[in-house]
Image (cartoon, rainbow, N blue to C red):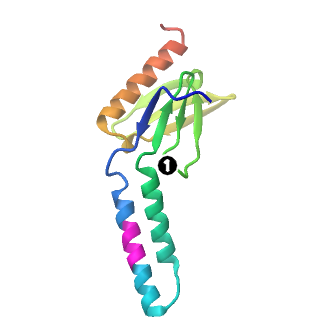
Amino acid sequence: MNEPEKLFKMKPGKLNGLIILGLLMTALGIYDFITIGSTNVPLVAGIFFIIISVMGRDYPILKLFDDHIEIRPGPMARKKLILYSEIESLEEKPKKSFLSVNQNGKKKKITLPMTYLTKDDQEELIKELRSRMYVVRGGG
C-alpha cells in the first residue's frame, strides 16, 4: 500500500481521562490484591486502559491517501476505507461532520471523529476532503 499524503493524529489531552481512570482502577486492584489476596478485574482493566491510552497518543486516526481516506479512531477500532469517488457529500455540523457515501450501491452516513482533532486539524481536514471530492468529480 502506498504511503499516506496526510496524517491527522489525536489531539493532545484527549486520552488523559482514560489514563486517570486506568491509574485509579490499577490502584484499586492493587489495594484489593493486598487486602483480599486475589487478582481482580479492576487491576486488569486498569492496566488495559493505561496501555490503550499510551498506544493512542501518537496514533493517526485519519489518513488521507491519493485515492481514499482511512478512518480509524483508535488502535483497536475497526478501520474504514472510503474512496473519494464514493463520497456523495460532506455535512458539517458544530460538533460532528458526516460523509454520505455510496459503497457498492449501499448508501451510508459515516461520522468523522472531529472531536478527536484540534480546531486547526478539523479545518484542514474539511478543506482537504472538499478539494479531493472536487477533483474526483472532475472540477479541477
Rendered location of residue 7, percent (x, y) = 44, 33
Q: Residue furthest right?
A: 104
Which of the 4 image quadrants contains residue 24? bottom left
Q: Residue furthest bottom?
A: 36
Which amino acid does the dot numbered 1 rest on?
Gly
Span of residues in magenta: 21-27
Nearest the eye: 110 or 34: 34
Instruction: Classify 111 as above or below 13.
Output: above
Q: Which quadrant would residue 94 be assigned to in this image?
A: top left
Residue located beneath label 1 in the image: 74
Label 1: which secondary element: loop
- Give coordinates of residue 27: x percent, y percent: 38, 77
Predominant secondary structure, magenta span: helix
Q: Residue at x 47, y 76 (%)?
A: 42
Few, some or many residues within 10 Å of mark 1 (<14, 14–19, 20+): some
Residue at horizontal 34%, vertical 58%?
16
10 over 49 or under it: above or below: above
Image check: 66 left or right of 30?
right
Estimate the x, y position of residue 115 in percent, counting from the top left: 37, 44
Image location (x, y in percent) of residue 13: 31, 51
Tell me how many marks there are.
Answer: 1
Task: Pick the quarter of the image with the N terminus.
Answer: top right
Specify whether residue 40 is painted magenta.
no
- Residue at x 51% of width, y 29% of height: 4
39 up-or-down from 125: above or below: below
Tell whether position 25 is magenta: yes
In which quadrant of the rendered view does residue 54 lie? Answer: bottom left
